[in-house]
Image (spheres, rainbow, N blue to C red):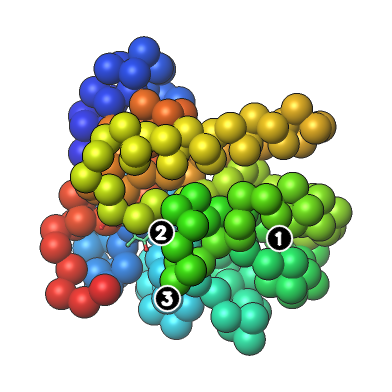
Amino acid sequence: MRDRVAAAALTAGRDPDSVRLLAVSKTWPAECVREAARAGQTAFGENYVQEGVAKIAALADLPLEWHFIGPLQSNKTRPVAAHFHWVHSIDRAKLAHRLSEQRDPHLPPLQVCIQVNVSGEATKSGVAPGEVAALAEAVAGLPRLRLRGLMCIPEPEQDTARLRARFAQLRELRDALNGRGFALDTLSMGMSHDLEAAIAEGATMVRVGTAIFGTRERA
Ligand SMILES: *Cc1c(COP(=O)(O)O)cnc(C)c1O
């Protein structure tokens, strides 16, 4: 998997070290994570609060970095603030406020990305592109969060040019924010089926499940 990410970076004329691999371990047992850690993987992504927290506890003996990447209900922020290092799916100010309030002051700030809906589908989560700047201002003002960048999950798209345009939109939004004084270093975009296109458009973190662990039996 590292080879595929590195090859995509080189094809795009980028330094392979500029793209981090996040291994998405949702639905896979802690032992699978332990095996991946033994092979050198350190950053893991989880979608479900209970499952993620249980795995973090089971693997507390390992120095792993845990990323919450799934939709997050406001009433489930507390365990996420307590146990995860990153949250990629901030899509409303209320969520950010709760996470900041609940983050233990003795822990490093929670690293967060704003999830943007780049496909314009009513069903998908993420803030509309036109509302990103206002949400970024709100998040940046919170003491226990550190805004690192933007995240997207585009609708599946057969046409490569159209897919790349979605990823390019996230990069342009990030660049526009940085032009307004933010210092966002993260573009969380690209999964098993579309990471080459995402890396070509500037992804700094790809979230890969199936291509590492195999096909999941449930979502
Ligand atoms: C499941 C999931 C992934 C990984 O998807 P694969 O297609 O298995 O690589 C990445 N990001 C998010 C938000 C996910 O929910």
Q: Which mark is nearer the camera, 1 or 3?
A: 3
Amino acid type at mark 1: Leu
Side (left or right) of 141 relative to 156: right
Who's the residue at 42% across and 35% down the image?
A: 165
Amino acid type at mark 2: Gly
Whether the residue carrying mark 2 lies under 8 Å from ligand 1 is answered with yes
Q: Counting other residues with Cα less than 10 Å from the Cα at mark 3, is it few (<14), some (14-19), or many (20 or more)?
A: some
Q: CA distance from mark 1 to mark 3?
A: 22 Å
Whether the residue carrying mark 1 lies under 8 Å from ligand 1 is answered with no
Residue 145 pos. (x, y %): 74, 56
Residue 78 visible somewhere in the drawing: yes
Residue of label 3: 48
Amino acid type at mark 3: Tyr
Q: Which label number is shown at residue 212?
A: none
Ligand 1 occupies quarter: bottom left
Residue of label 2: 45
Q: Counting other residues with Cα less than 10 Å from the Cα at mark 2, is it few (<14), some (14-19), or many (20 or more)?
A: many
Who's the residue at 78% across and 53% down the image?
A: 134
Q: Are marks 1 and 3 in contact (CB under 8 Å)?
A: no
Is 133 above or below relative to 90?
above
Side (left or right) of 33 relative to 65: left
